[in-house]
Amino acid sequence: MPYAKTLQIRSLKGLSGKLAYLSNPKHRNHKDKAIQPAVFHRIPNAAVFLSKTISTMRDLKTRQRRGRPIKNYADEVIIRLPDWSNPTAEERDQFIKSILADFCPDSPAVAVWHVDRFSKSADVHILVANFIDCYPPKIRRSAAFNPINLVRASSDRVTDIVNQRRREQGVAP
């Protein structure tokens, strides 16, 4: 089963730093990683993601009159596949589409794969803006939305796909 985790990004500096970190192949933590090109959901590039998230969240904060204050600008979802899983490019695309459809069908997102050069494991990092992209925009907050449950369900689907591939190759899952 893949490792799944969510983190809240609570500052603008943290959001811009995380975007820069995820796609930087020269970062010291990425020595053993092959950084794949970013996949964008509902936006054309990282600059638009950052500017749209900042402007929308500022607008939402100024319009808020009651209720709990808005604390996080985005959520980071991290799903790590097991060692030696070695997902193909097609499988990675399928995983991303499945995860984005589950976790943020109506919010902008940026996804980046980090593939380990030695163990052939892969980590997908997904930054999801904390608003629903509609008019007027709404904060992604409700009793029905539980990020960790959605991430775990998505990682279970990824596990099923990896296990199916292993069965087809004659490897025990």
Image (cartoon, helix red, strand yellow):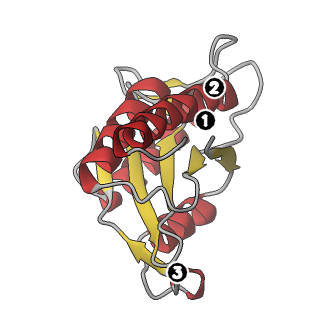
**Dot 2 and dot 1 residues touching (CB under 8 Å):** yes
**Residue 96 visible here:** yes
Tell me which amino acid carries mark 3: His
- Give the label on residue 61, or none: 1
Callout 3: 10 Å neighbours few (<14), some, many (20+)?
some
Looking at numbered disc 1 in the image, what kind of residue is underneath it?
Lys
Seen from this angle, which residue lies furthest front? 170
Task: Estimate the x, y position of residue 35 in percent, counting from the top left.
Answer: 39, 72
Q: At label 2, which amino acid type do we have?
A: Gln
Q: Which residue lies most toward the right here?
A: 68
The residue that mark 2 highlights is 64
Q: Residue furthest top?
A: 144
**Is 30 drawn above or below residue 79 in the view shown?**
below
Measuring from the top left, give residue 160's x and y in whole percent.
48, 31
Residue designated by label 3:
30
**Position in image of residue 67 (x %, y %):** 75, 19
Q: Position of residue 47 (x, y in %)?
A: 33, 61
Pointer 2: residues within 10 angstroms few (<14), some, or many (20+)? few
When the figure is inspected, residue 109 is found, relative to residue 32, above or below; the finding is above
Q: First in sequence: mark 3 or mark 1?
A: 3
Q: Is residue 58 left or right of residue 35?
A: right
SS at circle 1: helix
Q: Are marks 2 and 3 in contact (CB under 8 Å)?
A: no
Callout in the foreground (2, 3): 3
Left or right of 62? Residue 22 is left
Label 3 or label 1, whichever lies nearer to me, is 3
Q: State the SS at label 2.
A: loop
Q: CA distance from mark 2 to mark 1?
A: 5 Å
Q: In the picture shown, does residue 19 fall above or below 129? A: below
Q: Can the viewer see residue 108 in this picture?
A: no
